[in-house]
Image (cartoon, grey):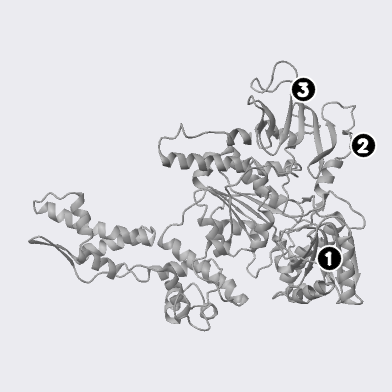
Amino acid sequence: MREDVESLDIRDVTGTWVTAVILQNQIEARIAALADLSDTPLFFGRLDYLHAISEELSEGSGGESFYIGRRHVHDADGDPMVIDWRAPVSQPFYRASRAEPMDVERRRRFGYTGGELTAYEDEHLTDPAAETFTGSAGGATTSALLAAEIEKPRVGPMRDIVATIQPEQDEIVRSDIAGTICVQGAPGTGKTAVGLHRVAYLLYAHRERLARTGTLVIGPNNAFLSYIEQVLPALGELEVAQATVQQLVAHVEVRGEDTPEAARLKGDARMAEVLRRAVRAGITLPTEPCVVVRGSRRWRVPVHELVGIIEELKDREIRYGAARDALPQRIAHAVLLKMEQGGEAPDDRVQDAVARNSAVKAVVKECWPAVDPAKLVLRLLSEPEFLARCAEGVLTAEEQQAVLWPKPGRSVKTARWTPADAVLVDEVTDVVQRTPSLGHVVLDEAQDLSPMQYRAVGRRCTTGSATVLGDLAQGTTPWATASWPDALHHLGKPDAHVEELTKGFRVPEEVIAYASRLLPAIAPGLAPATSVRDAPGSLVVRPVTAWEDDVLEACREALGHEGSTGLIAADARIPQLAELLTAAGLPHLSPGTETSAEARLTLVPASLAKGLEYDYVVLDEPAAVIAGEPDERTGLRRLYVALTRAVSGLTVLHGEPLPEQLR
């Protein structure tokens, strides 16, 4: 298929150089999408039907077989060899069961090792006498290949889960594009992968629509985005943008940090009203008429008419910038009416000329001044009197004092902007000029966003839909959301459907049960997660006697297994651990860096562990992880995240007493 595209000659079909460039770009994108991935098999399953299901796909009477894979593959005649997993005919591969076989006689799964086909197993869905599985997997009664795929050692970035999608996950993946869906998912339930595969599905089902409007994946940090960036290309999707919330709102250079209380208040939804008032604070009513000179005649718009025009624009609640653009035209229209009453016959060109008249411009500048978003927020956070006027009845005097900068900024370039300040600038930017909307946005680790950050994301999908992914128990910011209805309200999607995933596939049962002891303290309303994988010996809790020796020993033990290892520790202990590993000759990486045969150990600050996963995890000193956060609940939530990053084994090292909930 790739060679066919590479052999195309476009010289005879392009009329202009512009057409040639566009077509060549499309061909290059197609070639890139058809690239070989040596360790990514083209097919992973097969469906054998009881009878022909489609006149188009069948070749006559009897059942048909379809190979299911990551993308569509056809032969030289154009006949399908592999069916895309997103096609309707592939859906029974994920949803068919003995209770509801969906006309499938047999479902076959293929197992691979390094891209080489090494096993298969069959599931007979309509023969009550047959065992559930037969084949080279050894006649197991549960899917050994499914378990092996989930437990396969991890090296490099996050792998796609297309071969292991479960029925409840498939239902979310194939949800309609018109609706926003929120997924509350416990650790190991695959919520991130489900969100990414939902994007791939929507691009397949609504490609033209999303090609026009665009798609975006929003993650908590760059390390996380690096970790997931290869999932969509492995499915043949290359046109999905990725960003963090801070990259979305990068109107100013962030160089400062807020106190937790200041950050919480700046992220409060009430700040939206304060900012709206600040933007409109410059609007004043005229006290003098507007006199426009045209040739030998003077046209006068009295004060009361100007006041009526401005009041009417204020009441319409349209964007500040749009109203400012409309104001000169409205004044010019009033002048044209007077010209017509005076016997003239002006046209649209005259109205545009009047709108550009210096007298009209002077009225607009005086009554509806231009607003620079960054300068406005700079003034708001630097001038107590201005903030008090805009926040009256919204923020208390103590809250106003908390959000003010300790040292007022002198200019936009020299001010020490904080991440929360950048979100405020983005809010003002939208009040002045509407933010363009995308067709679909995936928001991962959403529980950590403030109401103002939700508003910033919501602005990017006002006319589109969203997939919101998160876990309330993993909220590790002072402003972490308390409930999904609250979060969806701030996002502007109050009618979104909330799905809960509680059955884990990644984290072993011993590990998730141990971590779930923290749930009553960090998220009392959530049901504990369960795991389909029981792995005896996957959890080791070890008191430390000689810290350096014990850490190195635990890391070497983990590296003795195949796959990746993560050493997770409190942020403050990372430099010391880095020196220790280097001195011991253990090569290690930073989060987001792809592991290799030479370096399979990643040193992970606890603050960056969210969303990542490793085959084996060594967790250094839980008490230090808790102490590194501003309060105990946030510290316990950070610990919950760190405890649930392991796929095959977790070793907890502690010199200080464990938190009461884990004893």
Please, is residue 194 above or below residue 573 in the view?
Answer: above
Circle nearer the N terminus (3, 1): 3
| Residue 268: x %, y % from top left | 55, 68
- In the rendering, at what x and y percent does residue 482 appear? 65, 63
Quadrant in which the C terminus is drawn: bottom right
> x, y (%) of residue 502?
76, 51
Between 509 and 494, the one lying in front of the other is: 509
Above or below, 283 relative to 125 = below
Secondary structure under the numbered disc 1 in the rendered image: strand
Q: Residue at x 31, y 67 (%)?
A: 368
Residue 183: tell me if it is visible.
yes
Labels 3, 2: front one: 2
Q: Secondary structure at mark 2?
A: loop
Q: Is residue 347 left or right of residue 613?
A: left
In depth, the one of 614 and 177 nearer the eye is 614
Give the foreground label among 3 and 1.
Answer: 1
Residue identifier under label 1: 618
**Is residue 597 shown above or below 196?**
below
**Which amino acid, by three-letter code, is at mark 3?**
Leu
Residue marked by disc 3: 50
Left or right of 326 in this view: 87? right
Does residue 246 appear to the left or right of 276 in the view shown? right
Count of number-bearing discs: 3
Q: What is the quadrant of residue 228 in the picture?
A: bottom right
- Residues packed near mark 2 inside 10 Å, few (<14), some (14 to 19) or many (20 plus): few
